[in-house]
Image: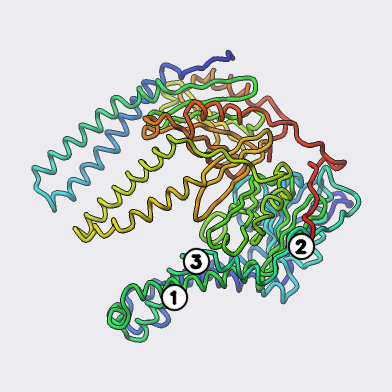
Amino acid sequence: MNDEWRGLDSRARWMFHLQAASQFLFGWVPAVIIASLLAVTMFQVRRVVAADLVLLGALFLFALWWPSLTFDRFRYLLLDDRLMIHSGVLFRRTVVIPRHRIQHVDIRQGVWEQIFGLARIYVHTASGLGGDGVIPGLSNEVAEEIRDALVHRVGTDDGV
Amino acid sequence: MASDEPEFRKLHGASVLVNLIPQAWRVFRQSWYLLIPLLFGTRAVQGAWLDFAILCFFFLRTVGATVVHWLTLRYRVIGGRLEIETGLLQRQIRSLDADRVQNVERVQNLFQRMAGLVEVKVETASGEGVEGLLSALSVEDADELITALEAARVHAVSEPPPDEVLVENNAFDILRFGVVTRGYGATMVVFGLVMEGMQLMGRDPTRSFVDKLDLAGLGVLLLCGGWLLGVATAFFGRYGYRLHRIGHTLISEEGLLTRRRTEIRASKVQRVTWSVTVPSRWLGFGSVYVETAGLSPSAGGTQTAEGVVPVVPLAHLAEVAGLLVPEIKDEPTLQPIRFAAWYAELFAHLLRWSVGLAFVLALFGWWGLLFLVFTPMSFGLLVYDLMNEGYAITAELVAAQRGGWVRELVVIPRRKIQAAAAVDTFLLRPFGLGRVQVWAAGSSVLLPLMPLEEALSTARLLGDPPPVPPAPDAAGQPALPDALPAS
């Protein structure tokens, strides 16, 4: 693998958008409707409907715009001695994981990943408290390549 | 099965009764709010039969689990590992590599001590609770098991090493520790008992107390009661504290009614924290907390600190920490936080304070403005915290200090770092600041705010392979410093 920052597979952008759309349709919309049914007992119907439209409009714009931002800002870098993952929009995070600290690597595919032919890598260290790394939106071939590169080191001190 | 293989052993026959009493007490403690009105309520309580059925269910479940546990559990040490078989319908064989053991704890509550029994807990770094729990062994069987585990390790030494006492706290020391320990959780327990007690006596608690005591008096009463309960709990839990070392194993012993003995291998120490509060500083001491990668759940949460040295003279804090982590030679020289970090922290606090004020005003109207009375104290405490905040990164250690009222210095050896991350948020971005979080196995430390570029380069630096450790001794263990001279 080259020593340069890499982004996610291009199909991941569409996957993120569809995930956000389904979250909007099947999560936010029902939640706003239920909240409105409770709110009409306390406020005027007209005001509740206006608030709903504003809220749903904002959430819709968020679902339209946010996935692309998340996709564009996700980068990872695999060096000889470490894995670095940079992600986040409002809360940006750069994680550095020494390769000799990696305990094991998982490759997972949810429903959306299977539809798009993508996979997600979970890198586990002994920290157990969030110091592990996740790389979503990888093609199956790249995910396996990264996994093979990360787990071949055995017998080194894992610091535990 | 080969005839020379060690045989499986079972728990002591008295374990059913010895475990039943504390288990039943635990069920009672967790459901006292159901039990007290049920047993002593003067009015018929709707759903009382349901509460009674729920309590009976949990009690019978406890009895059943205790009996099954005794009937089915058996253990042995074979081929360098501890094997524990348990279960009736769902059988499980757990194998723990002796070299992967983080710490071994021996606990004797009052009933176990009367019966000559001990509970042994063996923890690894999996973080899934106590991986090896043997709830009642005879003292001889427990000693034999721990000796066998030690012998099964790859770098086991053949000659028994000497026992060196490192720190000893007497009763007065423990009382000092208890006095400064906060007991706010106990306050709520006392509050609940007082309220229930008054209702049982047929009095309306709010009316009686408003008539006879003002609310401030009630608050003082409850805080004092909770504090006294906290002092007593700390005293009974830490009584007779002793830290000693046998070879490369650190052993802490404490407890009056329940005697607890924790064995931690020095090489497994992940993090050391020394903590000094303002009251403890007045009394001339601080406390040292030790963490390994073994996390175990305890009542009410996850226990992260494996060992606590309750009372250490202020001048010896670094020395005691150095006994646990050899890389600590002296108190690290800390770099204070940057000027921009002051602005960022004060701004963030102002935002939080404003949200709190808005919330209070929404609830209480203009009376909520009384909340502003606490503003100088809140900002004053923040400034005091920031004055004491700092960090240090050396070739061997990462250290971070935070807090004024409760000052904590956290140290992680760089050879134990699992990962590091630099984080910045949309609130910090205008200030050009970021933070670094460093993970060891089962713990982490957050460094103070610093320029974002520095945070990124620091995270990369900490992800470098660890520096060359001190030359190990013949048993393959890192060299340990000498014990403190006896005071």
Residue B7 placement (x, y as % from top left): 82, 56
Check if mark 3's residue and mark 2's residue have beta carbons within 8 Å: no
Does residue B219 appear left or right of residue B59 in this picture?
left
Q: What is the three-letter code of the residue carrying label 3? A: Gly
Q: Write the residue at 61% across / 70% down.
A: B175
Mark 1 or 3, closer to the camera: 3
Residue B283 placement (x, y as % from top left): 59, 64
- Residue B258 visible to an observer of this rendering: no
Q: Are marks 2 and 1 on the same chain?
A: yes
Q: Which residue is mark 1?
A: B35
Q: Which residue is mark 3?
A: B183
Does residue B155 appear left or right of residue A54 in this picture?
right
Q: What is the three-letter code of the residue carrying label 1? A: Leu
Mark 3 or 2, closer to the camera: 2
Q: What is the three-letter code of the residue carrying label 2? A: Ser
Work out how far the residue at label 2 is from the one at label 1, CA to CA, in angstroms. Answer: 50 Å
Q: Which structural element holds mark 3? A: loop
Residue situated furthest bottom in the rendering:
B201
Q: Residues within 10 Å of mark 1 (few under 14, many from 20)?
A: some
Residue situated furthest right in the rendering:
B159
